[in-house]
Image: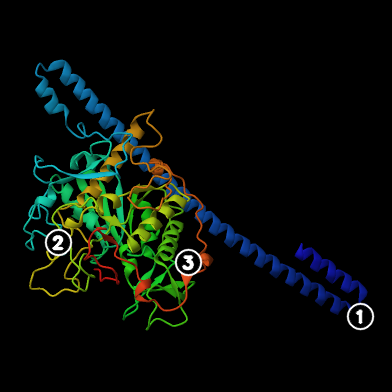
Amino acid sequence: MVLQCEIGWRSQSLKSQPKESTTEQSTIKISTTKELTIKKSTTEESSTKKSIEELSTKKLATFLKRQQEVRRGLRRTLVLLLQRSSQSSMEKLTENSSSPSSAVSVGSSIGANYRAEEDCDISKGEWVLDSAAEDYYYTNSSCRMIQDHQNCMKHGRPDVEFLRWRWRPEDCDLPRFDPRWFLELVRGTSVAFVGDSLARNQLQSLLCLLSTVAHPEDISSSKDTQDRRLFYGDYNFTVAIFWTPFLVKSYDAGGEYTHVFLDEVDEWAGPHLAAFDYLILSSGTWWTRPCIYFKNREPFACNYCRPPAPANLTRLGLYEANGAAFRAALDALRWYQGAVVLRTFSPSHFEGGQWNAGGHCDRRKPEAEWRLEGMELDLYRTQVEEFRKAKREMWVLDVTSAMVMRPDGHPDVYGHPAEKRVAMKHDCVHWCLPGPVDVWNELWLYMLSQRQRQLTTPHAAASVAFSLVAGDSPLPYSSTLSFLPLSPAAIAATPANASFDSSSIGKEGMVSGATTTADRPQSPCRLPTSSNASTSYPPRPLD
């Protein structure tokens, strides 16, 4: 249209001008023709470039989708073959064997005794003492993959009674972790733990739980201990960890503050994730640090707003900041075809003071009366709310209700040699290995077993035992949270057009002025009747 108008205008201009010379007219025509040719060439070049870009994007998306579909199909076929083989062996054994005990012994091979009940909410329950339990899954001697500051037995923790407590959901029994069954369920797949040091805590727990039957090979491409890849060759199973404590881009600016870019994710969310079937997201603990928040590469807010933070910044609450980062992370995963698993907030248990003022966690058994409060309650509620609003299907691995009752599970002073000087003498953030943190992988195995049941049972229920019902609060606090019913069909989920509006950051939930002691988050996790619990909670150092 632009070209036609321009030709018409030029033609009309030429008609209105007096004829001078043939040479001049020829020059005008040649100039006009050249100009039109250049404009057409530029338009065609731009259109061709745009078409190539769109075609490349479509081809990449199609390739990733087909790759994921092939992997899912192979996995389903393998599971069906294993199940039919197990059933066939059981039938032959029953027909030919005269000894019932013999039949039970041979027929209870891989996963045959594992029962995951369909209508049980495994996030609710209690810790029960199982004094008649078998020996624990592993020890710090049998598993050599425990990070030193979670190796409580190595550093002299005197009691082992805290290992005798098992998580019992309200309406069912949670089976013991079966390493062979787990490895069969994940055969031919890969999982990435994404997040902070608690993600690493869960990864090391899984490696130790599997160490009784298999050991992985380190296939990491770099020497960076924060980003590792391990491979179980016999099962074609890969496990990796990607370090990103805020799930968005951040860096230590030197001094007191960490710079956090609430609308940008870092390298963990790159194309390499297409190789992974599961992502387990872990975040929350690092939000207690003093931070300056950025939007569009410009600082606009902070949490502990005091010098040396710029005076013109307003204070952004942890609820709003954590929510914005979580939305940015999900937005960056719009293309991802695998299962996104949200592992909920892991509480700490400081008593008697702050982490740097005598706070400790020296209890020796679970405490059913402990409650999630203050800052940590806000962080947990943020995760649940963003899960509810997510524009894609996700799994939720809700460990918060169980772990809030385990003040006895932290290293405390047994995360380092007694003579060593460390910034956090009492570690009430991470978890001993072995220890209560192993229940996280017990719950995950339960979820995988439910998923396998759906793949192999045509009439399995649409929502399974670990679903969260709308309006049902898993923790004993007054505020009611809303949950989405959980669909474990996340593996087959198609990417939704999740969007992140960075312009909304910093417009709500903010107050101006410096942060006072009263503004700081209160003690996150304590007994309501305790008179010596901490009443203020400054940011704590983390590895």
Locate residue 321 relative to residue 151 in the image: left or right: right
Q: Quadrant of residue 79?
A: top left
The Cα–Cα distance between marks 3 and 1, rounded to whole angstroms, is 74 Å
The Cα–Cα distance between marks 2 and 1, rounded to whole angstroms, is 103 Å
Mark 2 vs mark 1: which is more N-terminal?
1
- Name the residue carrying label 1: 20
- Name the residue carrying label 3: 509
- Judge the density around disc 1: few (<14), some (14-19), many (≥20) Cα neighbours within 10 Å: few
At x 50%, y 66%, the residue is 508
- Name the residue carrying label 2: 362
At x 24%, y 27%, the residue is 85
At x 37%, y 70%, the residue is 250
Say if 222 sits above or below 162 in the image.
Answer: below
Q: Amino acid at mark 1?
A: Glu
Q: Amino acid at mark 2?
A: Asp
Q: Horizontal and vertical percent for residue 534?
A: 25, 67
